[in-house]
Image (tube, grey):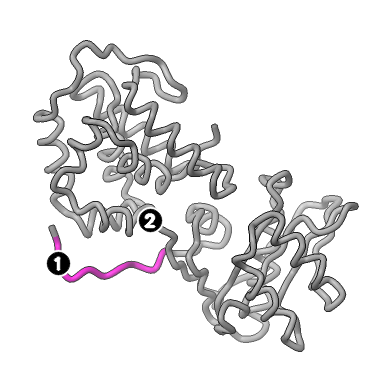
Amino acid sequence: MRYTDRSLRILKYAEMEAERTTKIVYPIHLLLGVLLERTSVCAELYINYPNLTEKLNKRVKEIQLDKGDEGFNYDPFTLNISQTTKRVLVHAENQMKRFKQVYLNEGHIVDAIFKVNDKLTRAIIDGLDVSRILEIVSLPRDMVVSLKDYSFPTFPKSGITFRKAKQKDASSLKTFVEKEFGNGWLDSIENGFLQEDIPIFIALDGQGIIGFACFDVVRSKKGLFGPMGTSYSNRIQGIGYTLLHYCLGEMKEIGYEYAVIGEAGPLEFYEKACNALVIPKKFTDHR
């Protein structure tokens, strides 16, 4: 299984908390690990739910853990993990695959903690503001990229062609999108092809389209990047990174000072690729 850098740090923090308490990694330690990871949405959770760490630390002492559970080894942990923790991680991996993603992130982990239904996870959830936690960490989030000082990066040579889409590409691109991602993005793709200067870039190999990225196509909103997608078999080759920057470069040329990435799923990808920042959520109360 591939993990994002942030999720690996979360697992390490969880292991540190388990070492300090139960000597076996339980799901509650995963949630404590999220709170110790003070970056991006994890930092936002810590700020918006300031007494959650205290609640969870108290709950570690209260929960009746299975004293006969010696746990078992599970990569990448060095401490043993519980059966419930394994179920959480398997659920997180299945969620990742369901969304055709290739890296397990903090959102998958937190979602799985609350979706695995057994006595240990129910004991964690009891009395917590689950909807708020999921809204901050697990649901897609809007992000913003400053284009004021943006500079177009240099890409290594590859056998892949990147170019602006043309009207003749409309049918093949819609076929590609529907096959790889379903029909949810087809209206946005159609909006792009209705524009005189089509705001869509595509990636092609010898067989045809293997990736695309758009801007100004979702509900015809200006300054909004996306959707973007790469065929599952061609992930982790830098195709999405390149397509993203072709769009950002053109958005800067048009005159946009910021680009908004709507409902981004792999937050860490955009944070690293273009210094995108999650747009904070505002809540009216603190628990």
Front residue of 194/284: it is: 194
Q: Report the amino acid beneath label 2.
A: Ser
Q: Position of residue 279 (x, y in %)?
A: 39, 68
In the image, residue 156 sits, relative to residue 141, either above or below, namely above
Q: Is residue 155 left or right of residue 68?
A: right
Q: Amino acid at mark 1?
A: Asp
Quadrant in the rendering for residue 247: bottom right
**Rounded to the nearest whole Å, what is the CA distance between mark 2 and mark 1?**
20 Å
Which residue is depicted at the point 59% across and 47% down? 100
- Residue for point 34% across, 17% down: 80
Q: Earlier in the sequence, mark 2 or mark 1?
A: 2
The crowding category of the residue bearing disc 1, from other C-alpha atoms within 10 Å (few below 14, some 14 to 19, many at least 20), is few
Whether residue 5 appears in magenta in the rendering, the answer is no
Can residue 282 be found in the magenta stretch?
A: yes
For the residue pair 122 and 137, the one nearer the viewer reads as 122
With respect to residue 25, does 232 lie above or below? below
Disc number lying in front (2 or 1):
1
Count of numbered circles on the image: 2
Q: Which element is circle 2 on? A: helix
Q: Position of residue 13 (x, y in %)?
A: 32, 34
Q: Residue at x 81, y 59 (%)?
A: 209
Q: Which mark is residue 40?
A: 2
- Crowd class of label 2 (few under 14; some 14 to 19; many from 20; radius 10 Å): some
* Residue 115, picture quadrant: top left
Return the x and y of residue 226 as percentages of the image width and height.
60, 69
Q: Residue furthest bottom?
A: 196
**Which residue is pictured at 25% across the width and 25% down the height?**
18
Q: Residue furthest right?
A: 206
Q: Which residue is mark 1?
A: 285
Residues shaded magenta? 278-286
Task: Depth check: give the residue in front, 105 or 90.
Answer: 90
**Element under disc 1:** loop
